[in-house]
């Protein structure tokens, strides 16, 4: 099965019939050979000297020979994320962790009704945000990393100034029940929210008012997300449905439902906007082609029958692996990257899957109890996980042995390209306890993260 890697258009837009008729070749291949193509038509004083022509031909032959000898790097068969830091401070279970788009901060929210802002580099605690009257299930960063939105069981959405740690004066009021999920639009001017009241609200951030209310589902809305250009919204629910909405009109463009009809607990668009990744309470994570309305990949190996689990996307390459010259490869400017998906599990594990092959690249163990939240920094590729054990684990990728490939990907793999950046993730949690500081793993720099 072959899946096109060209950017996916919104389902409501039809492709022009003439579009495919004009496939212009924009490649630069062969341009060097045409460099002096008009020598015979030029005056003798402007022609390329024969000596230079010979040197140019020799150079081309050497480049071709070097390219032929250079082996193609094979996709690593495993990743090596290792424990880097453990952050402590929340008094109850942690429902979500999110890296800021600029990679400087890590936000966490908890059933203890607080949000904590940590330094992504050192793990130092910068702010504890207090103002909600009940547990917080979801957080989302604005694209400029200046504002953090939070949704709580107190039915309010609050916007926080991250630099001051203070809430903006006007909360977003309108939902009739617990707020489960949030997402900022790519431009930062809108927020979409999903609630236990079965509705999806679209908010104007500037006025703090509801722009549109979508009667989305017949059960609590467990997940929402914006596509990369903001034109589409995805929502999911424990009613087993995933819906794709037109942001501008509020029209439902597509309804996705699997034959098993398992409750869907989270949904997110792939970074390139062509797919949605959904977690369901049948221990499956499914990648949907939402335009065709079909599942293209199913990822398994974890256990998820009770809790709402988040997922995240990341990218990896053979650069930096053992035996691969990082400087040489980066200088070539043609570094092949592959996508992975990561999600938690009810039993405390974290699984990392290759998006195309569905192989488990790594299984991480470090939490006691369900892992509810996971996120990948788009800047450093650090991984953060959190759960019912009231801790945040930071994982750092280390090199693993990588073999040189002969023919690239396996024949039975369907290559799915999910280029670049990562959106947000969400989810609820419970439990109690008390801890106050971050504990780096032995061998990592010690960073003080005590409050106050």
Image: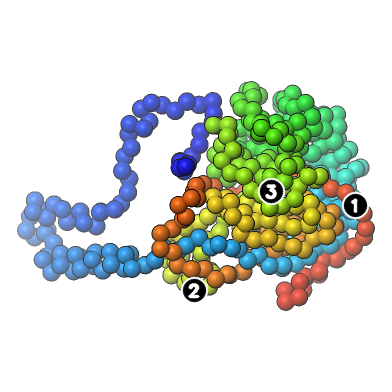
Q: Which mark is residue 280?
A: none
Instruction: Between residue 72 and residue 60, name the one nearer to us.
Output: 72
Tag 3–tag 2 contact (CB < 8 Å): no
Please tell me how crowded label 1 is: few (under 14), some (14-19), or many (20+) other residues with Cα within 10 Å.
some
Q: Which residue in the structure is indicated by mark 2? A: 323
Residue occupying image coordinates x 64% and y 48%:
299
Q: Which residue in the structure is indicated by mark 1? A: 431
Q: Percent position (x, y) of residue 48?
A: 13, 61
Name the element at disc 2.
Answer: loop
Tag 1–tag 3 contact (CB < 8 Å): no
Please tell me how crowded label 3 is: few (under 14), some (14-19), or many (20+) other residues with Cα within 10 Å.
many
Q: CA distance from mark 1 to mark 3?
A: 21 Å
Q: Which residue in the structure is indicated by mark 3? A: 311
Name the element at disc 3.
Answer: strand
Q: Percent position (x, y) of residue 218?
A: 77, 26
Residue occupying image coordinates x 62% and y 54%:
353
Name the element at disc 1.
Answer: loop
The mark that comes first in sequence, 1 or 2, is: 2
Q: Percent position (x, y) of residue 355?
A: 57, 50
Q: Percent position (x, y) of residue 347?
A: 79, 55
Residue occupying image coordinates x 85% and y 29%:
176
Color style of the picture: rainbow
Instruction: Between residue 281 and residue 197, name the one nearer to us.
Output: 281
């Amino acid at each position: 099965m072959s899946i096109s890697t060209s950017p996916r258009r919104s389902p409501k837009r039809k492709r022009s019939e003439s579009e495919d008729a004009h496939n212009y070749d924009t490649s630069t291949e062969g341009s060097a050979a045409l460099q002096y193509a008009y020598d015979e038509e030029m005056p003798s004083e402007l022609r390329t000297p024969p000596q230079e022509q010979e040197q140019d031909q020799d150079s081309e032959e050497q480049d071709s020979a070097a390219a032929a000898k250079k082996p193609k790097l094979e996709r690593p068969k495993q990743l090596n994320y290792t424990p880097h830091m453990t952050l402590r401070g929340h008094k109850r279970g942690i429902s979500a962790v999110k890296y800021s788009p600029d990679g400087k901060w890590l936000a966490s929210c908890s059933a203890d009704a607080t949000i904590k802002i940590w330094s992504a580099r050192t793990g130092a605690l910068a702010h504890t945000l207090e103002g909600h009257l009940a547990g917080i299930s979801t957080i989302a960063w604005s694209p400029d990393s200046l504002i953090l939105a939070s949704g709580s069981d107190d039915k309010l959405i609050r916007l926080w100034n991250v630099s001051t740690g203070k809430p903006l004066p006007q909360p977003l009021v309108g939902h009739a029940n617990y707020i489960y999920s949030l997402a900022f639009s790519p431009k930062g001017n809108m927020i979409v929210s999903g609630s236990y009241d079965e509705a999806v609200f679209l908010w104007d951030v500037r006025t703090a008012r509801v722009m549109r209310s979508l009667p989305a589902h017949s059960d609590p809305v467990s997940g929402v997300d914006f596509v990369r250009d903001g034109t589409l919204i995805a929502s999911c629910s424990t009613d087993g449905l995933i819906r794709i909405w037109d942001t501008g009109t509020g029209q439902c463009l597509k309804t996705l439902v699997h034959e098993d009809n398992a409750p869907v607990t989270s949904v997110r668009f792939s970074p390139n906007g062509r797919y949605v990744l959904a977690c369901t309470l049948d221990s499956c994570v499914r990648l949907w082609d939402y335009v065709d309305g079909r599942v293209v990949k199913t990822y398994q190996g974890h256990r998820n029958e009770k809790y709402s689990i988040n997922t995240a996307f990341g990218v990896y390459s053979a650069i930096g692996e053992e035996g691969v010259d990082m400087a040489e490869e980066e200088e070539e400017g043609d570094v092949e990257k592959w996508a992975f998906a990561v999600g938690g599990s009810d039993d405390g594990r974290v699984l990392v899957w290759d998006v195309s092959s569905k192989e488990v690249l790594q299984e991480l163990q470090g939490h006691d109890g369900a892992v509810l939240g996971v996120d990948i920094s788009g800047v450093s590729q650090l991984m953060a996980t959190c759960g019912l054990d009231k801790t945040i684990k930071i994982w750092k990728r280390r090199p693993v042995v990588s073999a040189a490939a002969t023919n690239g990907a396996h024949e039975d793999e369907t290559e799915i390209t999910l280029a670049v950046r990562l959106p947000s993730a969400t989810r609820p949690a419970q439990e109690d306890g008390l801890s106050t500081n971050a504990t780096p793993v032995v061998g990592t720099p010690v960073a003080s993260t005590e409050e106050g």
